[in-house]
Amino acid sequence: MKEKYIKQPNHIITARFTLSNLEKNIIYTILSQLQKSMSKDLNQKYVESEVTIKLKTLDKNRNYKRIKSAIKSLAGKQVEFELNIPNGKKPDKIQANVTSLVSGLKYERNSEFISFMVPSQASRFFCYTGGGYTKFQKTIAISLTSYYSKRLYELCCRWADRGGFDCKIEEFRRLMSIENKYKQISHLRTRVLEDSQKQLEKSADVFFKYTLKKEGGKYTDIVFKIHRNIHIGKKNRQVRSDYYSFVYNFLNQYFPRYLDDRAQVYSDSIAYADELYTAYKRFGRLDDDLTTGKKTKKDIINLLNAVILKELKAI
DNA sequence: TTCTCCGCGTTTGGACGGTC
DNA sequence: GACCGTCCAAACGCGGAGAA
């Protein structure tokens, strides 16, 4: 698999700040460069980090002025975010933080690169994964043209393994940073939901379908159903989300995602090879064998590695 | 390589009419 | 009256061509 997945801590999705498209792409690039510093350890010492970006990756025309103003705008923004700190069997502790995201822009005239500093507190913002993280493809996220598409892409990736999610419309507005915008539901529907839906369906590896629910004559909830696309040549092919979810969740038992991304990589490869249905049936039988005691977990891992994954063209 | 500028697409809000 | 859908217009942002 050639796709470049990046991890994004979940508190970034819920952080309160508004960004332009270019600013969002800068954030993705920062995340991509800080991947090695990602940690679940709250006591990890984060230091100020220098991030260097190739101008061309942010702007085809290497428009330095535009990029500079986006970074200056980011530097002027204070982000408010909450960290979920695991607290044993008790509910997570919530730690509130405020920080600026970048500082110290540096650019050598005629250079291909631009660099700036990410303060230590902002490094924690970008790297602390103790409250969970979402994995998505950086190139897809950057290529999405609207801010809402990017946001919804992140949400789809976050909930893809569960096949969907539902939330109150007010909560959705907060997630999209549009508490005071699109007050008319039809505006919200066409401009935030449907435009993003079309874009994701066309060019992302996951997309969503949604239903608005009414209570007492007023729309109150949104239910999202998440589906998969497999990229073939220049086209996307839709994948049965129920088969994909089952296959992914099965593999996740043997290749847990806190260790590495093999469950996702294998699931994508199986879908790409058009073997999802075969995998769905096969894994179903293995699950039965495990439940009835015919096979142990170790037997299944050995079988997967030695035979089944090869047959399903996952490796 | 950098910058300016134009055109187009996106975002946003308001007005108005229809439905419950 | 409250809520929703459609239409319209203005503001804004972005992509790309071309000049400096």
Image (cartoon, coloured by chain):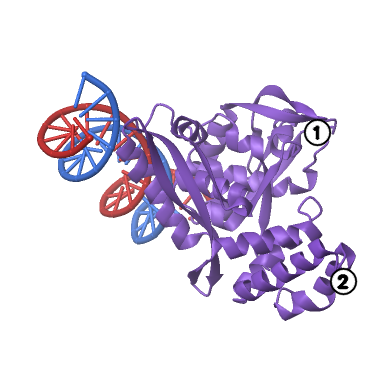
Chain colours: A purple, B red, C blue
How far across and down, in percent of the image, does residue A269 sit?
Answer: 66, 71
Of the residues under marks 1 and 2, which one precedes in the sequence? 1
- Tags 1 and 2 on a common chain: yes
Q: Is residue A205 visible?
A: yes
Return the residue at label 2. Answer: A302
Badge 2 element:
helix
Amino acid type of the residue tagged 2 in the rendering: Asn
Tally of numbered discs: 2
- Say which amino acid is labelled 1: Tyr
**Which residue is pictured at 48% across the width and 32% down the height?**
A177
How far, Cα to Cα, is label 1 from label 2? 40 Å
Residue at 69 percent of width and 48 percent of height? A7
User: Split into 4 quadrants, where in the image is the N terminus of chain A?
Assistant: bottom right
Mark 1 vs 2: CB contact within 8 A: no
Camera-nearest residue between A80 and A121:
A80
Residue A46 disc label: 1
Quarter of the image for residue A292 reads bottom right
Chain under disc 1 = A
